[in-house]
Amino acid sequence: MAGRRTDTRERIQQVALELFAERGYDKTSLQEVAERLEITRPALYYHFRTKEDILASVVDRLCDSIDELMTWAGEQPRTAESRREILRRISGLMEDQWRPMFRFAQVNQGVMQHNVAGERMRSRIVGMVSVLAVPGVSAVKQFESRLAVFAVILGSAPFLFDMDLDEAERADVALEVAAKLVAD
């Protein structure tokens, strides 16, 4: 039963983010989320009482993923291969979890600016951008390491690129560019 509850929560999160990105956070009601899911409002309320609860849960999951990545990355040797693997893992997170959240954040910037969940997400992303930075190296190398992470993140943002590439191709290109930025 616990697996089923988790699946339903994840579906609610996914559908809510889609609706928030399509219609805007403020213009989307829980009733619309329930209708798109083809569930009753009480069934939705069983999992989430408010839109804020849904958003907070999505951000919590995202922050937990970033924290896990940051912990793992901190335990890796400072080698070219580990930097490439960190970038691959960031790219994987973008594909799995972040892309819908970034679409939501782009459309709902005001909500994210004035929301505790938005601040939590921003602080984690700032930390993640620094994950490849090596203390004591030149400012240029530190900047390149941050740009590499941004390249992977921005590769998931189709609204920023006018390129005839699907999401997977764009992510591959971004990862290749990022790897070049952190190559020795």
Image (cartoon, rainbow, N blue to C red):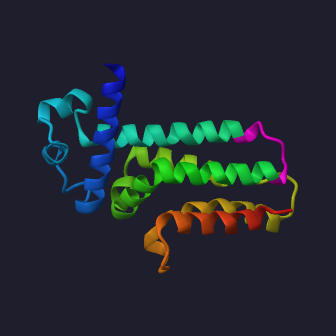
Percent of width and height locating residue 182: 78, 62
Q: Is residue 165 left or right of residue 7?
A: right
Q: Can residue 155 be seen from the camera position used here?
A: no
Residue at x 13% of width, y 45% of height: 35
- Along the viewing direction, whichever of 29 and 19 lies nearer the viewer: 19
Magenta span of residues: 73-80
Q: Is residue 117 above or below residue 148?
A: above
Q: Is residue 158 magenta?
A: no
Residue 77 shown left or right of residue 178 in the figure: right
Tell me where residue 48 appears, x and y as whole percent: 25, 33
Q: Is residue 93 visible?
A: yes
Q: Residue at x 28, y 40 (%)?
A: 12
From what the image shows, is residue 54 above or below residue 85? above
Q: Nearer the viewer, residue 29 or 97?
A: 97
Query: With respect to residue 15, does 103 lie above or below?
Result: below
Residue 75 included in the magenta stretch of the image: yes
Count of numbered marks: 0
Tell me which corner region of the image, top left, top right, bottom left or bottom right, holds residue 8: top left
**Residue at the (36%, 24%) spot, across then down:** 3
Task: From the top left corner, tell me how far across and down residue 111 is, in percent.
Answer: 33, 54
Q: Is residue 51 above or below residue 169?
A: above
View extreme (top): residue: 1
